[in-house]
Image (cartoon, rainbow, N blue to C red):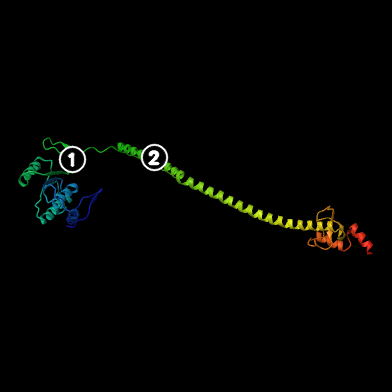
Amino acid sequence: MIIEPRVRGFICTTAHPVGCLVNVRDQIAYVLRQGPIPECPKRVAVLGCSTGYGLASRIVATFAGGAETIGMSLEREPTATRTGTAGWYNNRAFEIEAAKIGRSPLTLEGDAFSDEMKKTFVDRVREKFGQLDMLVYSMAAPARTDPDTGGKAEGPPRPSPDAEARRLEEKANALRENVDELVSELDRRRHRAMRTYLRPTLIGVAIAGVAALATLAVLAWRSAGRRSSRTARKTGKKMARVGLALRRAAAHPERTVRVAGPGLGRPGGGRVAVERSGVLRSGAGPGGLGGVLDRARRGQGELHPAVAAGQARSGG
């Protein structure tokens, strides 16, 4: 028989015996890697032992705890045209692997809710164990039939679409409220971080900027002061030379000439006494002291009275 997967909804309705064997062996290998469990009960019964938690509990009790087990599950055997259930292949694979380590598990397959199966289970437990150390209940039965009344009992009803929609809406509203609270908390933390770290940084930058501006202002003031000092020194030297010339002219009037002109290069200036020896020859320009001296030498100026009298007496 060629086994092909057949899927109905999210359930595969066909099972491959080799795949089930590999699955059981993988679970056994994982349990063995975790190490032994010395305190594990030694006489264990598992109701619903073929898949899920029941199969896992049976594997742990047998391969980690060294226990003898009895299991019960409702399975369908394979036929010539149809595969058995996955649980049926899992039970066979478990029994094969348990026999390899010297265990002799017992598996009952039938309706666990029927009176006949209940009696069979109790009898086998008494024969094999005498009593149980642990009972694992892992039944996955969506419905059961009462053997006395024939009534059918089902699991809890599924919620209606409207109720499910309301439940989802309530859950969404709760999530939105949580998101809003989270955003508010993030904003508070961000503002707190800005107050704690950013504001001192900005204050420091502002202080550094003010200090830099103050430094530039001091440097500019010092530079201007140096330029003013140089100008004042130059002006002072010129005025000192002028004062020296005037003192000499006052002491020796016969050696000076009186020249009319714009004075020291200023419009409307008065008369300036100029020493003929050329002490003030450093003046520049026609209105400066040097220019005055040149004009005096060329005869363009008015001689001082004392000088004129001296020239008359000497005849020339």
* In the image: residue 11, left or right of residue 184: left
- Mark 1 secondary-structure assignment: strand
Q: Is residue 214 visible?
A: yes
Task: Locate residue 206, reporting x and y percent.
Answer: 53, 47
Q: Residue at x 91, y 61 (%)?
A: 310
Task: Locate residue 213, reporting x and y percent.
Answer: 58, 50
Q: Which label sits on residue 247?
A: none
- What is the quadrant of the N terminus in the image? bottom left
- What is the quadrant of the C terminus in the image? bottom right
* In the image: residue 197, left or right of residue 121: right
Rendered view: 53 above or below 147 = below
Task: Locate residue 150, reporting x and y percent.
Answer: 13, 36
* In the image: residue 274, left or right of residue 104: right
The amino acid sitting under disc 1 is Ala
- Mark 2 secondary-structure assignment: helix
**Which residue in the structure is indicated by mark 1?**
143
> Marks 1 and 2: which is nearer the front?
2
Ranked by sequence position, the earlier of labels 1 and 2 is 1
* In the image: residue 270, left or right of residue 126: right
Q: Residue at x 19, y 47 (%)?
A: 53
The amino acid sitting under disc 2 is Glu
Q: Which label sits on residue 181?
A: 2
